[in-house]
Amino acid sequence: MFTDRTGSDGRRGRPTGLARVAGVIGCAALLVSGCGGSTATPLASTPAASAIAPSNAASAQAPSAAPSDAGYTGPAATISYSIWGDPAEIKNQQAVVDAFHTANPKITVKVTVSDWDTYWDKLQTGIAGGDAPDVFAMDGPLFPDYQSRDVLLDLKPFIDRDGYDLGQLADQAVGDFTTPGGQFGLPRDLNVIALYYNKKMFDTASIPYPDDSWDWAKLTEVATKLTLKGGDGKVTQWGFFTETSDMENYWSSLVWQNGGDILAPDHKSTVLGSDQAVGGIQHLQDLIWKDKIMPDAASWPTDSGDAFEQGKAAIEADGSWLVATHQAAGIDLGIAPLPKGPAGQATSINPTGAVVYAKTKNPDASWAFVKYLASPAAQTKLMELRASLPANKEVLAGPYSSSFDGAKVLADALTYAHIKPSFKGYDEFATTLQTELDANVFEANKETVREAIDKVLPALNSILSGQ
């Protein structure tokens, strides 16, 4: 139905590999990451919270005169909230839910946490049976496939009634859940791609740390020096590492840095066939097979853990969701902007949203909870987890930027970030494209990027034109 099959990184739930089936994008939001388990773990803001059985009549229910930014004043309600993530993060989720319940004691929130693949499978089953969660996490690129099937509640009537200010949230993220027909979610968190580096490895090699002056050539130069081999000629330390199994982790940024793009402005065709786009992806292929400063995906599958996290690589281009993971691994972590390309600086931004099921029995209570997830109080808790960037501008520009070493680099990246493509049919598009790149470009050096892209262009354009 809707499931994205481009792979999950097993930590954040973001996309990273057909072999593991994308997290179209990783464990964002209020989770520190680790989406490896397949069990679903419920928790509630009060004991024995009962499950919700959505009503068809609720899909057309207009907002009643109740909740406002001052607090929920409607009847007592129990709502369900479903997210992807690691069961180990229940403690963090419980803190968020408990804080909401304190502010809104009439509302009990029952949370279910599942790993990325299980999450989408359960959500689809629930929707098909008319029994989906009241509120659930939504990945930006997958949003159009769900919204176009009329399974999400339009929040604009609630926003208008309460005078809710969407301007307090990151504009790019708000836009990802906006359609000409309404507002179908609020952003819960953001993720950007940046450059991580192991300070100890740089210090050992007496090499200055990366900064905003770096470009592609400088990355290649330094990563070559930091790629070390043992007496048997085998690499003992890679200079660079990134996950190649999804556009978000790095290669889309390279396309933009080279002056290319992924979609035409009308989203009816792809422009990946341009020399600029092909050249950006070719740069990544060259880092593997020509420069030999990073391992290929086949020899270092990401389900075994990433090379940087394991202390086997000096530099990594990857998502903001990995900050807590790398710190927990004991790495002396540095964070810098991605190296500039020929066309300048660029990175990827991808939001996770909180959406409401169109058939919920409790639209007012669900709206009150969605608002809370985007509030400074909840976003500050998100900040403390270091799992992703707050979507609330007040928190992002204020306490987040100084909350840890490198946080400002991540926050500043939003000024030059491109939104990860979001369109109906993303799943099929991404799977078709990534299957070709994985098999013949990143996991094996069988084709040039030009050959690979040209091979799949007709299929990609057919998917886009049919939406």
Image (cartoon, rainbow, N blue to C red):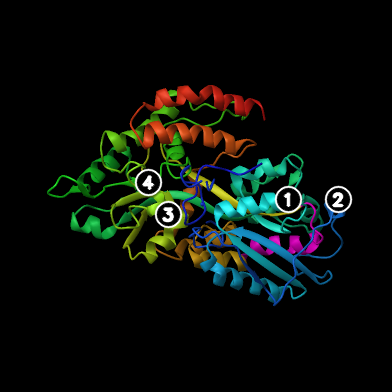
Asked if residue 187 shows in the view, the reply is yes
Q: Is residue 385 left or right of residue 185?
A: left
Q: Quadrant of the N terminus?
A: top right
Residue 47: percent from the left, percent from the top? 69, 77
Q: Tags 3 and 1 in contact by the CB under 8 Å rule?
A: no
| Three-letter amino acid code of the residue under disc 1 | Ile
| Three-letter amino acid code of the residue under disc 3 | Val
Q: Residues within 10 Å of mark 1 (few under 14, many from 20)?
A: some
| Mark 2 to mark 3 CA distance (whole Å) | 44 Å
Residue 263: percent from the left, percent from the top? 55, 30
| Mark 2 to mark 4 CA distance (whole Å) | 46 Å
Q: Tags 2 and 4 in contact by the CB under 8 Å rule?
A: no
The residue carrying mark 3 is 409
Residue 372: percent from the left, percent from the top? 68, 64
Asked if residue 152 shows in the view, the reply is no
The residue carrying mark 4 is 242
Q: Is residue 434 above or below residue 301?
A: above
Kind of element beneath mark 2: helix
- What residue is at 42 percent from the left and 49 percent from the top? 318
Q: Residues within 10 Å of mark 4 (few under 14, many from 20)?
A: many
Q: Residues within 10 Å of mark 2 (few under 14, many from 20)?
A: few
Label whose residue precedes the other's in the sequence (3 or 1): 1
Q: Which mark is residue 239?
A: none
- What residue is at 28 percent from the left and 59 percent from the top? 199
The residue carrying mark 1 is 127
Label whose residue precedes the other's in the sequence (1 or 4): 1
| Mark 3 to mark 1 CA distance (whole Å) | 39 Å
Q: Tags 1 and 2 in contact by the CB under 8 Å rule?
A: no
The residue carrying mark 2 is 60
Label whose residue precedes the other's in the sequence (1 or 2): 2
**Image: magenta residue range:** 358-376
| Three-letter amino acid code of the residue under disc 2 | Ala
